[in-house]
Each structure stands twice: as structure tokens, then as C-alpha cells.
Image: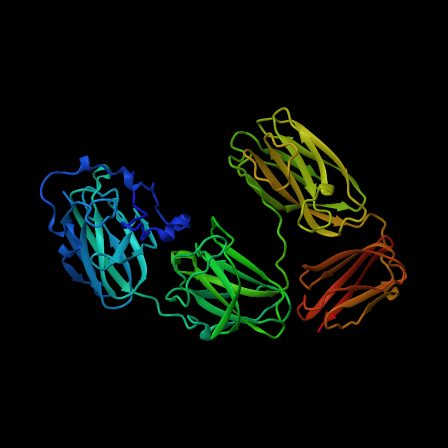
């Protein structure tokens, strides 16, 4: 198997290569097994004299211009480890006169080398190194490795050609070094050039890139990890509410780190960071909620790509008003349904879905059925092939995205494959109206099943549920409901002669999206104030009041 050393230690144990890989290894293409330095044995070396470039001072320089390629040929037979790299090596040397993106390949080496170092070095003896952003064994058509470096400053660099007989990296080699121009520095490379973002009720993504960016300040320790570099770009926004949310969505494998500052560009104070998605899915999104902001104050945001190793370094960013929308858990399992532990069918109302158990989590929320407040129903679940599994189901009746114990509609201890499980349940009369979820889980040896825990074997399926009024519930006379002030600059107050008992209050925007929902126990003509100040953008909304006496709807305007 091909290998590449991802870590190189000097005598003082200074880690030079692989730093960007060590914490974000998933971003490296074609990464094979990492071999420890201790795997080398001197007995594998061939006899004879050492090559002239066995030490870095023996390397012969070649000048490398932008748009060109220089080629080195040599032989690392009988090389020794003169520089405490951990493996024997010979040295090649090249010089650039401007910022360059470098590609170093072993293309043409026969037979293909099966190991190599992933850094270039400055100084002889070397004093510092730059790790490759990525590498693969596919660019060369003959199975050799290619390393990719981005934004390398002008200078003289050394590359060590490893000798590793155990992995066929010994003998004659060909080394090709190519240079292309670095990307132009973005206009928002520094805080003073920050791109202004406008907070809105919904995310309005602004396209951006860190290609060509430089490091304004060192990377921050965030979520327990620190990027080896911080080639950052800057944004700013003026707070229009106490709470805002910053969302950065990566393109391809861009792995964002977000840091937010108060103060002026000349005197910044970091107030927080976000780097929560690791190991990263593709694409990667980071969501950073901010609270306690001062309305009218300008805040600055810097964004960088962890390790600066993504393809293109592109992303989008937006600032929204209020806290981020809560999300449902989507639990996985180590082995999923691979051993027959799955949900073969779910039937409830209009939902009748048969599956074969492919993934540990399945989102079937596009399938939906109506359930009435106070209505009685039966959920049918068919056991998969294994049989001896535990089952449980929940409906998020209060629409808070949390599956609470009171929302568990049944559990069952399966015994036989293909077994049909029936779980009767009744919808609470005060269940919040609108779209919500049915959450069904199958897990091996997991009783009592938790709605969100990751288990060794099993499957989870989510479905859409729409809670509707019980049959016969009528419309409340809107003339008997008071909503004031309307238009409002923030909070609004509600009262009415027919608003008594438990009343669900739902505010929706013009797209039908729920932006506010609460439930109150009210008395006739008792005023209830909705705390909306600073939470909603200007516009027209639809207010729905649902109680035991019926439902009332009317428009509300926020100025």
C-alpha cells in the first residue's frame, strides 16, 4: 500500500508537516495508511557510497518561474538520515521570486515510489517547513504521488526525497515541480476592507472566498482545535436586535472557522468563535448564535478555511435576526441496519412506507399525514429481518424540536423478523397546530430506546405530521379579539371575550413559515403580551389564535 509520512520531527520534536492533516484528515484526498517512523529498519538500505545530495548543502538549485516546471532526476540509494527526519533522504532545491501555488509530483518515477515526505523546507539546515495542503496518487497516471501547496511565499525551498525500501521508495526518481500564480488578494483581506452584511429575517447568502487571503492574526483555539493557518477575510454588520445568527455555508469541502469581534479595526476584542462541525460533512455549514448585542453597534466577523486546504476556498455567509432555528436530532448508529436491524414499514394515516434498511437515518418528512387534536390513532411498524430489536416512536406535539418523554407514543420489544407492531395513541387536545414530526427508532439491545442516542445497530426514520383542529371546531368572531398596537414596533398584546382556557398563539410570515409560537392559559378579556421586540423584521405577518372556542386569524404589521 502507498504511504506518505504526515509528520516529520526534528531532534527537538518540532512538528513541521501534516499539521493541517492531523486534525482535519478528512480533507486530504487520497490519504493512505500513515506509517510510524519506527517502521524503518537499517537493514533495508543498499550498500555503497552516499549520494552527493545526501545533505541539503549538496542540492543543486533550479529557478522556478510562474507558469513553468522544473524537473529533478536522481537516485536516493544509500541515503542516510543526516537531518533527523526519521527516514533517510536526499535533497532537491528550487527558488521562486513571487507568491506561487506549487505542485510537486513523482510522475515518471519507475517503479512508482510508495512513500514520501509532505513538506517543503526553508533553510539548510532547515529552520521551518510548509505542509502540503493536500496530496493524491491519482494526478500521476503511473500511480506516483502529487503534493499541492497553495500561496507559498517567494523564496528558496528544499524538498527531501525519502528512501524507504519497505515501500519501494528507493532508487532512481523523477521529481517535477510546477508553479502557478497565487490568487489575487481579496478586497476584504483586512478588517478595514470588511464587506458589510445586512441582517435580515431570512438568510440572504453573500458569496465569498478566502482564495488569495493572508493571515491578519493567528488562528484562534476554537472547539478544542487550532488551524495551522488563518488566511482570513472580513465582514461587518450593524446589530438591529440583541440576538443575531451568523451562518457560513461552505462550498465543496470549505471548513469554516468564524470569529466575531467588537470594537474598531484598530482595537478589536474577540467575543466568540464557532468551529463546531468536525468531522466535517460535505458541504460544511457553521452556525454561530450571538446574544447580548447592542443595537446600532458595528461588529466584525472574520472567516477562514481550516488548514486552507479546500477546493477553491469558496463559501457563503449571512446574518439573520434572532436565534438560529432549532433542529431535530438525526441519530446514527455504528453499523446501521447492516445486520437486519431496520424498520421495514411505517403506516399511519396517509403514510404507508416500506423500506429495505439502507441507511442508519432516513428523512421521510416529505411523507405526511393529518392528525386532529384529541384524535385517537394507531401507528403500525413492521420489524426488519433480525427480529430481536427494540422499537419506540415519538411525535413532537409542542413543535419545540425536542422529543420529550411525554411525547413518546409507544415502545415495543420485537422478537421476530417481519413482525407487525401496533402502537395506539391519542393526540393531546392542546397539541400545537401545524407541521411537526413523527420519529421512529429501531435499535438492538437498547431498551429503553432514547430518541437521540447513537446505537451500535439500528435505524431511525422521520415522517411529517400536520396537527389540525378537531372536527367541528369553528371560527372565533375576529371582532371579539383585540390585537394592539397594530401596526407595532415590537411587542403586541392580545385579549378577547372568547379567548379562554389553553390558547395556542402562532405568528407566520407571508411564506407560511412559523416565526413565533407560544401557548397560554387565558381568561376572557385577559391581556397577554407577546415579547416580539427585536425578534422580527419589518413586514406583515399572520396571527392565528387557536383555543377551545375556535380559531381566529388576522394580519399584524411590524414597523
- Please tell me which residue lies in front, 276 or 465: 276
Q: Is residue 397 above or below residue 243?
A: above
Quarter in which the N terminus is drawn: top left
For residue 39, side relative to residue 502 (left or right): left
The residue at the far front in this view is 12
Question: Which residue is drawn at the image coordinates 22% and 36% (left, top)?
Answer: 41
Residue 2 visible from this viewpoint? no
- Please tell me which residue lies in front, 169 or 261: 261
Question: Which residue is drawn at the image coordinates 57% and 34% (left, top)?
Answer: 458
Question: Which residue is drawn at the image coordinates 65% and 36% (left, top)?
Answer: 346
Residue 306 x, y percent position in the rendering: 42, 57
Residue 356 x, y percent position in the rendering: 56, 34
Residue 163 x, y percent position in the rendering: 20, 44
Q: Is residue 506 above or below residue 420?
A: below
Residue 502 visible from this viewpoint? yes
Residue 352: quadrant of the picture: top right
Question: Which residue is drawn at the image coordinates 25% and 42% (left, top)?
Answer: 114
The residue at the far top in this view is 416
Question: Count of labels shown?
Answer: 0
- Please tell me which residue lies in front, 212 or 127: 127
The residue at the far left in this view is 49
Quarter in which the C terminus is drawn: bottom right
Question: How are the residues colored?
Answer: rainbow
For residue 424, side relative to residue 480 (left or right): left
Residue 536 x, y percent position in the rendering: 68, 67
Amino acid at each position: 500500500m502507498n504511504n506518505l509520512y504526515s509528520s516529520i520531527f526534528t531532534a527537538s520534536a518540532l512538528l513541521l508537516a501534516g499539521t493541517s492533516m492531523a486534525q482535519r484528515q478528512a480533507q486530504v484526498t487520497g490519504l493512505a495508511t500513515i506509517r510510524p517512523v519506527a517502521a524503518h529498519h537499517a537493514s533495508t538500505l543498499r550498500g555503497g557510497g552516499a549520494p552527493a545530495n545526501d545533505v541539503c548543502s549538496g542540492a543543486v538549485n533550479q529557478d522556478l518561474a510562474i507558469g513553468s516546471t522544473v524537473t529533478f532526476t536522481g537516485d536516493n540509494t544509500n541515503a542516510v538520515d543526516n537531518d533527523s527526519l526519521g527516514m533517510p533522504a536526499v535533497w532537491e532545491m528550487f527558488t521562486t521570486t513571487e507568491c506561487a501555488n506549487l505542485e510537486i509530483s513523482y510522475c515518471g518515477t519507475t517503479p512508482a515510489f510508495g512513500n514520501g515526505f509532505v513538506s517543503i523546507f526553508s533553510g539548510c539546515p532547515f529552520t521551518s517547513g510548509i505542509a502540503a495542503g493536500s496530496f493524491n496518487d491519482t494526478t500521476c497516471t503511473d500511480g506516483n504521488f502529487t503534493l499541492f501547496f497553495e500561496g507559498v511565499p517567494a523564496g528558496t525551498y528544499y524538498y527531501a526525497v525519502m528512501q524507504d525500501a519497505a515501500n519501494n521508495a528507493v532508487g532512481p526518481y523523477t521529481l517535477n515541480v510546477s508553479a502557478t500564480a497565487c490568487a489575487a488578494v481579496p478586497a476584504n483581506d483586512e478588517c478595514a476592507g470588511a464587506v458589510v452584511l445586512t441582517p435580515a429575517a431570512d438568510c440572504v447568502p453573500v458569496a465569498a472566498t478566502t482564495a488569495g487571503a493572508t493571515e491578519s492574526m493567528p488562528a484562534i483555539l476554537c472547539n478544542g482545535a487550532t488551524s495551522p493557518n488563518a488566511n482570513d477575510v472580513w465582514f461587518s454588520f450593524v446589530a438591529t436586535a440583541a440576538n443575531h445568527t451568523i451562518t457560513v455555508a461552505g462550498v465543496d469541502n470549505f471548513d469554516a472557522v468564524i470569529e466575531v469581534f467588537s470594537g474598531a479595526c484598530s482595537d478589536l476584542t474577540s467575543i466568540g468563535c464557532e468551529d463546531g462541525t468536525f468531522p466535517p460533512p460535505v458541504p460544511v455549514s457553521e452556525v454561530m448564535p450571538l446574544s447580548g448585542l447592542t443595537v446600532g453597534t458595528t461588529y466584525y466577523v472574520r472567516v477562514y478555511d481550516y488548514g486552507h486546504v479546500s477546493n477553491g476556498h469558496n463559501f457563503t455567509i449571512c446574518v439573520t435576526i434572532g436565534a438560529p432555528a432549532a433542529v431535530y436530532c438525526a441519530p446514527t448508529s455504528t453499523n446501521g441496519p447492516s445486520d437486519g436491524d431496520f424498520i421495514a414499514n411505517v403506516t399511519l394515516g396517509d403514510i404507508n412506507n416500506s423500506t429495505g434498511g439502507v441507511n442508519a437515518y432516513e428523512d421521510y418528512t416529505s411523507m405526511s399525514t393529518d392528525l386532529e387534536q384529541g384524535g385517537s390513532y394507531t401507528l403500525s411498524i413492521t420489524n426488519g429481518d433480525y427480529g430481536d430489536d427494540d422499537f419506540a416512536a415519538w411525535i413532537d406535539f409542542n413543535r419545540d424540536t425536542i422529543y420529550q418523554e411525554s411525547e413518546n407514543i409507544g415502545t415495543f420489544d420485537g422478537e421476530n423478523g417481519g413482525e407487525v407492531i401496533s402502537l395506539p395513541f391519542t393526540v393531546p387536545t392542546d397539541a400545537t397546530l401545524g407541521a411537526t414530526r413523527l420519529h421512529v427508532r429501531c435499535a438492538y439491545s437498547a431498551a429503553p430506546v432514547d430518541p437521540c442516542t447513537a446505537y451500535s445497530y439500528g435505524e431511525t426514520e422521520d415522517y411529517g405530521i400536520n396537527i389540525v383542529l378537531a372536527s367541528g371546531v369553528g371560527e372565533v368572531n375576529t371582532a371579539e379579539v383585540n390585537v394592539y398596537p397594530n401596526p407595532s414596533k415590537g411587542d403586541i398584546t392580545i385579549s378577547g371575550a372568547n379567548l379562554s382556557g389553553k390558547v395556542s398563539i402562532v405568528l407566520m410570515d407571508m411564506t407560511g413559515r412559523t416565526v413565533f409560537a407560544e401557548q397560554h392559559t387565558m381568561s376572557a378579556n385577559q391581556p397577554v403580551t407577546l415579547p416580539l421586540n427585536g425578534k422580527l423584521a419589518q413586514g406583515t405577518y399572520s396571527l392565528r389564535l387557536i383555543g377551545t372556542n375556535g380559531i381566529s386569524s388576522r394580519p399584524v404589521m411590524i414597523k
